[in-house]
Structure formats: C-alpha cells, structure tokens
Amino acid sequence: MTDRPFPVTPGWLDWYRGPSKPRFALPPGSVDAHCHVFGPAAEFPFASERKYTPVDASKHDLFALRDHLGVTRNVIVQATCHGADNSALVDALRTAGDLARGVATVRPDVSDGELRRLHDAGVRGVRFNFVRRLVDAAPTEALEAVVRRVAPLGWHVVLYFEAADLPGLESFFASLPVPLVIDHMGRPDVTRSADGPEFARFLRFVEANDVWVKVSCPERLTATGPRALDGERDAYRDVVPFARKVVDTFTDRVLWGTDWPHPNLKDHMPDDGLLVDHIPRVATTPDRRQALLVDNPMRLYWPEEAR
C-alpha cells in the first residue's frame, strides 16, 4: 500500500479475501447486477470531491470473484469515489467484453460523443445518489437534465436513496420518463415490519411505476444479523422478510447483486460466498431464482439475447 497516491479513509474495511465457495449453485447465466471497481488509484485516480477513499478493488479482482462464485456476467456500477470520470468503469467493461454492462455517472453537460462512447463500451444506465451522507444536495435538476440526454439511448436510471426520504421524492421519481432501478430495496428500516406502512409505501411506488428493484445488500441493511461470516447458514434474518416480499410480489422486476467490494461498511465485511448462499432464503423457488438471477437482468441489460 506504500505506493498508493491517496491514503485510505481511516477505519476503512478491506473486502473479504478468500471467500468461501458457495453451496448454492447459481443457475447458468447468472448475473451479479450490482458491483463496483475501485481504481487501482495509481492508474485511475479518485475524484477530488469524493466522500471516501477506498482500498483498491480492480477489474481483475472482480472477475476472479465472478468466476469463483459461479457468476456468468456483471453489471458494474460507477463508484462515487470516481465521480463522473468513468475511466475505470469503461476499462473494466472493455476487458470483460459482452460479459459485463455498466451504469455510469454523467453530468448534464456531457457531450453526445462521450455518451456514445459509453454506450459502445456497454453502459446502459446512469446512477444518481440521494443518500444524504454521500451527497451535498439532492441532485433533482441534474437528474432531469441527464434523463433528457440518455432517454434516446434507451438507458435507465439507477436510484440510491433511504426509505425515510421516499415520501419527498416519489412524485419526482415517478415523473421521469425512463425505467427506474432502485438500489438495495430503497434501504428499508428492517427494525420495522415488512408488512408495515413504511414498506407498503415503497411497494406501492414500485407497483405504480416502471421500477425494478435490487434485493441486494442485506449486510448493509441488517440490524441484528447474524453476519455472513464463519460459515453462517442463516445470515441477516431480519432482512429476509423484506427481500422475500419484493421477490414474491415483483418476480419479473427484481435483480440481485453482491455490491462487491462493499463500500463504506462500518460493522463487518461479509464473505461473498455466504452472500450467494443467502439467495435461496429470499427467492424460494427455482422459477423465482431463475427470474432474479438470469431472466430479469438479461432483459434489462442484454435484451438482444433475452428469452
């Protein structure tokens, strides 16, 4: 680490080295629809406006994890630490070829040429972050402007927000004329009931709009665990009812992802093999697992190949 151009954020948790081999065999063609690459910082410097500085997590590390877990394809999401410089993302997409698609970060003044370059590299969406600790202000005006630019390309918008903020944002989100993909189930408060009014509001929002939902990041949402470590076979029990309800209700509009390398976790770093073993807890039948892991992400990111 001595040759790093940036010091890592104090207390940063490194990604889990040597993950276990999953017991659950992923269906052929499975897609990890939410993962990232960080740097390497010496080759792809981090943005000056970043809120954190992570440990490097390269494309080679990501693709090694893909193969170890039995994943076939990845959807790589631009990391906030890289801002709107999508160089590391594009480099990873070009290396992966048709085995990866991307979600970029762009600003309203992005050129048509840059948008075409991103599309040709495999980008199919843009991400906007509404989590208050990660942004200085809700980027509503920028999002409206960017949507006008990317809608003709057939892209979608990935949204990251917390459940408490949905009431003030849902009318705006619903007005956007492109498909929406919601990260991590809109970050529900899992200390409350999955049958309660807060999560019911989120489900109504999904039902009423052109929305896809990632049932990802139980390690980020959990309040009581247990953690996906040390061979735990029943991890994140408090998150299961929420994810299962989403999968059962919107079977044809759900996605799954590892969120590797798990940025900004404060409590623990999960074993990614055990995260794969968590999937049958939330997608309880072969048909639901096939939809979650293969059919849905293929329709959204590889429609030309989808069944």
Image (tube, rainbow, N blue to C red):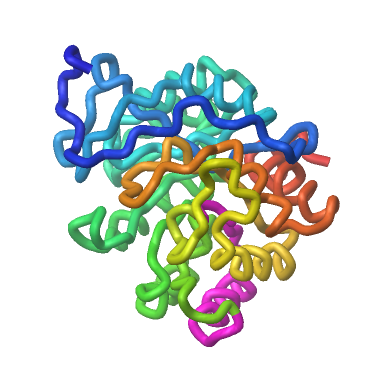
Task: State the residue in front, 245 or 237.
Answer: 237
Task: State the residue in front, 232 or 170.
Answer: 232
Report if residue 113 is visible in the image: no
Coordinates of residue 217 in the picture (x, y in percent): 50, 52
Report if residue 221 is visible in the image: yes
Coordinates of residue 229 in the picture (x, y in percent): 51, 44
Q: Quadrant of the N terminus?
A: top left
Residue 302, quarter of picture: top right
Residue at the (59%, 69%) spot, across then down = 242
Q: Is residue 123 left or right of residue 163?
A: right
Residue at the (49%, 34%) spot, across then down = 76
Residue at the (52%, 87%) spot, across then down = 197
The residue segment tinted magenta is 195-218
Task: State the residue in front, 223 or 40.
Answer: 223
Coordinates of residue 68 in the picture (x, y in percent): 63, 24
Q: Quadrant of the C terminus?
A: top right
Q: Residue most toward the front? A: 230
